[in-house]
Image (cartoon, helix red, strand yellow):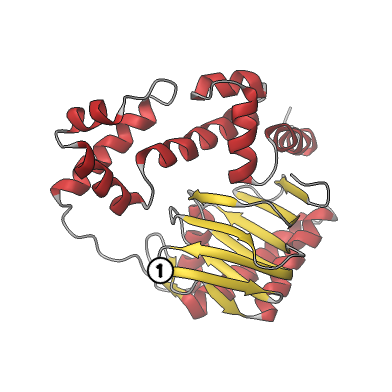
Amino acid sequence: MAPEERARHWQHPGMPGVDLLRAHYIRHTFPRHAHDGYVIAAVTRGIEVVGLPKGVERAGAGSVVLINPETPHTAHAGTGEGWSYHVLYPAVDVITEVAQEISAIRGTPSFTASLLDDPEAARLIADVHRAAEYDNALAADSTLRFAVARLLRSWGAAPASRRPAAAGTLAAHRARDLLAGRLAGPPSLDELAAEVGTSPFSLLRAFRQAYGLPPHAWLTGERVRAARRMLEDGIPPAEAATAVGFSDQPHLNRHFTRIVGVPPGAYQRERKNVQDQAPHTP
């Protein structure tokens, strides 16, 4: 991370299931990756360029970026001054709970827009951060729900009905499961294709169509997710790196920082602070 850049990725103990990121990036570039939860971001300064499956969005100050779970995307600065933003990363069950309270949506809702000109929603997102930073969990959680309800009422939709999976999609799903089960020692592309009963090129095409990423990029993202869970459990970064299949800690540092936005050491320190602050039951 460049010296002029700053970022804090953390979680308040009174807001389980919601990660917070407050950052100013200039040269940092997020590679194509996906989250298992939602991304709700309010840009406060500069321009963020977000690459999504349907195209590129340029988010300026006052705008809100919405990204649904498992949606591949990239991000980088759209101006020399970079961009500043407040980001909420709610887990699926957090958004689903609000949707069920305020609407007839059942199942995992999705947002139908990716870029909004909604200064009021942007203010609410910033207020969630502000309340959490002042250790006011009641205000933070309340404001979070107001913000999510506002966004769902205007842009929320029920999950699309599933169509029967094609043979290529089934092969991609099996390949994903094989990779997830062998993070530290994944098969080669030829081995992977043979195990799921298809050709390497057909697997590449089906995997990208199903997940928006080639297998090696998906594997890197999954390794980072697994490393996050290990860091949250207090496992040292060097040990986590080898356990999930990175060759060493610098290798983990590079990919983790690019995808998460902060180095693994900083991420773990923030998680330890949350655990120390959480109330303990006797």
Query: Which residue lies at the image location 74% right of the left edge and 55% below the top edge?
Result: 23
Query: Which residue lies at the image location 48% right of the left edge and 76% below the top edge?
Result: 155
- x%, y% of residue 104? 39, 73
10 Å crowding of disc 1: few (<14), some (14-19), many (20+)? few
Q: Is residue 83 left or right of residue 104?
A: right
Q: Nearer the viewer, residue 89 or 153?
A: 89
Q: Is residue 114 visible?
A: yes
Examine the image and state in which quarter residue 131 appears. bottom right
- x%, y% of residue 18? 62, 51
Q: Nearer the viewer, residue 123 or 195?
A: 195
Q: Nearer the viewer, residue 278 or 38?
A: 38
> Which residue is identified by label 1?
54
Q: Is residue 247 left or right of residue 263?
A: left
In the rendered view, tell whether residue 112 sits above or below residue 85.
below
Local secondary structure at mark 1:
loop
Q: Is residue 233 visible?
A: no
- x%, y% of residue 42? 67, 68
Query: Which residue lies at the image location 54% right of the left edge and 49% below the top edge?
Result: 31
Examine the image and state in which quarter residue 120 appears. bottom right
In the rendered view, tell whether residue 55 sits above or below residue 268.
below
The kind of residue tagged 1 is: Lys
- x%, y% of residue 53? 41, 63
In the rendered image, the quadrant that contains the C terminus is top right
